[in-house]
Amino acid sequence: MEQTLELLQKQKQILTQKQIQSLTILAMDNVELDCFLRQEYLDNPMLEINGQSPETVYESLPVLPSEDDKKWNHQMEESKDLKEYLRSQLNIGNNDEPYESLQKYLIECLDDSGYFTLSTKEVAGYFHTSEETVTNCLDELKLLEPVGVFSSDLKECLLRQLEALGSEEPLLKQMIKEHLEDVAHGNIGHISRSLKIPTSQVRKYMLMIGTLNPRPSTGFGIKKTEYIVPDIIIKKEEDWEIQLNDGWMGNYQINDYYQNMILKTKDNELRAYFREKASRATFILQNVEQRRKTLMNVTQFLLDQQLPYFEGTGPLHPMTMAEAAQALGIHPSTVSRAVKGKYIQYPKETVPMKNLFSQSVSGISGSTTRNAKEIQEMIRRRISEENKRSPYSDQKLKELLEGDGIFLSRRAVAKYRELMGIKSSFNRKES
């Protein structure tokens, strides 16, 4: 019985490690994948690349000018990665392997701000463990630096920072819990009346909130010069064609000579070594091929759904990653990882894949979804229809958009207007 349980535990450990590796490969862009495969090639004799060395294939890539290259390398050395920093704080070896794999997985799931927004139930199902285990693991990870990392939202992030500072201001905490939107809009009077405190105290609390960090990832991953290599190319000959821009990487495959060594060698230790290397090589190649299929499927779906946009005859159609996932029969997180950091080049321009999906803006029912470009066009149209002697204020535009089923704050309307380079109502007024 003990041996059976031990075997099941080992199998589970291997499964979770492979799941993490699979998700990591899917999230890589082409340049990251190439670097990963090059390193595997150097470490694993079972991999070969069409009889060439990776260096030969890599010569086809454009070389950066020496000055830019030097600057780029310098920036890379200075850059700190939040996830790497978090992993360095883990007490590796103090927990069993499945739990450590769960910790590493949760770290990989952080968004760009350092928040954890996935469902603990979803993660528990993925890891075949209890939701309580996932919650306990998250609670431990929340103790890591920087303070606020792994928060589920801005409120939790700010409250945890106050707690770490030893704040004894219950009204300040209440202000964060109940009035963050009012703080953002500067509604001092409303906060004062709600909390029954003087406006001077509200201003003091607002200043204190301003000293807190809304993004735990701030200070990590210093912005470096990006050299965009499109991962996918969409072009039109007679029909639209999709190509993965990975031909310069070469075709990695299993080395036949070493594969035969597994059968021929009489050295048991050597046979075990080559079997282990062959297993890893096969696993990596399978996941690279699965990444290729997923990218092609997601891109084909985008092309089918957004054809007028690619042809230059229409705007982006509102569409979420969840809708794409449902149509393709995969999990939304798979779509999210597939588009992460990837760029699509089509005849007009090169754009991040994620920009082809909607930024969700919901109505009261939560069912209305618009993308940012569509919202901007709606604002632009409303402004074009206004009386130039009495132009619409941002508040009026907000109300007009609500009539169209779009519910935004006045501040969000102003932000969209500014992004389009449109002046305020005061500066648009004509005499």
Image (cartoon, rainbow, N blue to C red):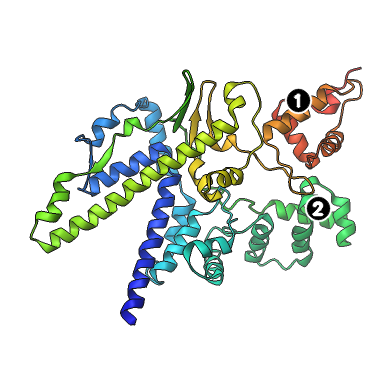
Residue name at image x 32 percent, y 51 percent: 283
| Label 1 Cα crowd, 10 Å radius (few <14 / some 14-19 / many 20+) | some
Between 56 and 339, the residue placed more toward the observer is 339
- The answer to whether any part of residue 198 appears in the image is no
| Vertical placement of residue 100 versus 336, above or below | below
Q: Nearer the viewer, residue 176 or 210?
A: 176
Residue at left offset 45%, top offset 37%: 296
Indicate which label's residue lies in the foreground, 2 or 1.
1
Q: CA distance from mark 2 to mark 1?
A: 31 Å
Q: Quadrant of the C terminus?
A: top right
Q: Disc 1 marks which residue? A: 422
Residue 58 is situated, as x and y percent measured from the top left of the image, at 29, 31
Q: Residue furthest bottom?
A: 1
- At horizontal 45% and vertical 59% (from top left) the residue drawn is 104
Helix, strand or loop at disc 1? loop
> Is 214 located above or below residue 228 in the figure?
below
Q: Where in the figure is residue 299, as x and y percent of width and height?
A: 50, 35
Q: Amino acid at mark 1?
A: Ile
- Label ID, residue 203: 2
Label 2 amino acid?
A: Arg
Q: Is residue 86 left or right of residue 63?
A: right
Residue at x 14% of width, y 45% of height: 257
* 206 lies above or below 90: above
Residue 92: which quarter of the image? bottom left
Secondary structure under tag 2 reads helix
**Residue 141 percent location from the top left of the image:** 52, 64
